[in-house]
Amino acid sequence: QVQLVESGGGLVQAGNSLRLSCTATGRAFSTYTVAWFRQVQGKERDFVAYINWSGEDTYYADSIKGRFTISRDNYENTMYLQMNNVQPEDTAVYFCAATTHPQESTFWSQNYYLSRLYEYWGQGTQVTVSS
């Protein structure tokens, strides 16, 4: 069983930075494909960023491209979301997600944003950006 625990959320002023962490337990973290999603209350969960098992492939939502960076440390069983120049529209609950089902990189290049492909989810961490 895989468990994911997010941390690092909080209240931050617009223009500042925040780093979210997601620590995994269970099977070898290095075999997971992982991603970050976010959700505003009453709205659908949206894709934010993706990183493959090795860290070589990353994808980002257009809304955060150039401001957020996803990374992972397989030795620490942890992935990160570095959020720079945050804006009020980044306010949401942020979730980390993981899948242990292997797929070719060509598959993920077309489907990384689909939440239904990730079977493990953290409990979420609230990020609130004040203007």
Image: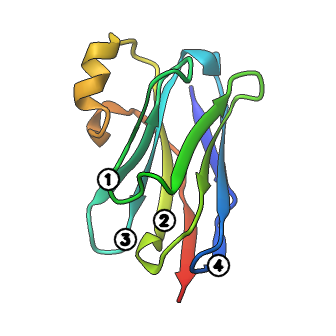
**Pointer 4 or 3: first along the chain:** 4
Q: Provide the secondary structure element on which disc 2 rests.
A: strand
Q: CA distance from mark 1 to mark 2?
A: 18 Å
Q: Provide the secondary structure element on which disc 3 rests.
A: loop
Q: Which residue is mark 1?
A: 62
Q: Which residue is mark 3?
A: 40
Q: Nearer the viewer, mark 1 or mark 2?
A: 1
Badge 3: few (under 14), some or many (20 or more) residues near its Cα, within 10 Å? some
Which of the numbered marks, if any, corresponds to residue 11? 4
Q: Residue at horizontal 31%, vertical 33%?
A: 112
In front of the other: 120 or 96 = 96
Q: Which residue is mark 2?
A: 93
Give left or right: position of 23 versus 123. right
Q: CA distance from mark 1 to mark 3?
A: 17 Å
Q: CA distance from mark 4 to mark 1?
A: 23 Å
Furthest residue to the left? 110
**Pointer 2 or 3: first along the chain:** 3
96 to 78, vertically: above or below? below
Task: Where is residue 55? Give x, y as percent.
Answer: 56, 24
Task: Where is residue 131? Give x, y as percent.
Answer: 53, 89
In front of the other: 119 or 15 = 15
Q: Amino acid at mark 3?
A: Val
45 to 27, vertically: above or below? below
Q: The N terminus is located in which quarter?
A: top right
Task: Where is residue 120? Give x, y as percent.
Answer: 46, 35
Q: Are marks 2 and 3 in contact (CB under 8 Å)?
A: yes
Q: Amino acid at mark 1?
A: Asp
Q: Provide the secondary structure element on which disc 4 rests.
A: strand
